[in-house]
Amino acid sequence: MANIKPFIILSLKHSEGSKPTFWRPDNAGYTELPWAAGFYTKAEIEADPSYYNDGYNTLAIELSNEGIESIGFTSQIDLKKVKALSKKAMTQRGKEATNV
C-alpha cells in the first residue's frame, strides 16, 4: 500500500495574529488545534485547489513535522509539569491498586 500523506487546511481567512485556524473534518467548522483538524488527500486538494489551497483564504499543509513547522507551528513541553503529572498519575495508580 502506498504511503499517503494527509494534509490539513489552514484557514488564512479565519486565523488571527499568531493563532492559526484549521478546517475540521469534512469541511465542517474550524479548530485552532492541528491534531483536531480534518485530513484531506492530495487528490482532493489537486481536484479543487481554488477551494483547498488558493493561498489567499486557504493553505494546504502536509501533516508532517516539516509541514507543520513550515508555518511556524511548534510544540514544546515543560518537563517540570510532565514530571508533576507523572507523579500524580503514579500516586493515583497506587491508590487504585490498594483499593482493589
Image (cartoon, helix red, strand yellow):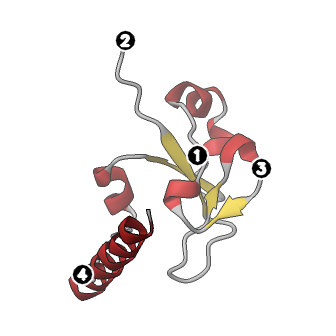
In terms of depth relative to the viewer, which is nearer, 85 or 18? 85
Q: Give residue 28's mark.
A: 3
Looking at marks 2 and 3 on the same chain, the residue that comes earlier in the sequence is marked by: 2
Looking at marks 4 and 2 on the same chain, the residue that comes earlier in the sequence is marked by: 2
In terms of depth relative to the viewer, which is nearer, 15 or 56? 15
Q: Is disc 3 placed on a helix, strand or loop?
A: loop
Quadrant position of the C terminus in the picture: bottom left
* Mark 1 residue type: Asn
Is the residue under label 3 in contact with that under label 4 (CB below 8 Å)? no
Give coordinates of residue 38: x percent, y percent. 61, 46
* Mark 2 residue type: Met
Q: In the image, what residue occupies the spot 57% across and 29% down?
A: 46
The residue mark sitting in front, 4 or 3, is 4
Q: Is disc 2 placed on a helix, strand or loop?
A: loop
- Looking at the image, residue 84 sits to the left or right of residue 20; the answer is left
Q: Give residue 53's mark.
A: 1
Q: In the image, what residue occupies the spot 22% across and 81% down?
A: 79
C-alpha span from label 4 to label 2: 40 Å
- Looking at the image, residue 19 sits to the left or right of residue 50; the answer is left
Give coordinates of residue 56: x percent, y percent. 62, 59
C-alpha span from label 4 to label 3: 37 Å
Q: Is disc 1 placed on a helix, strand or loop?
A: loop
What residue is disc 4 on? Answer: 83
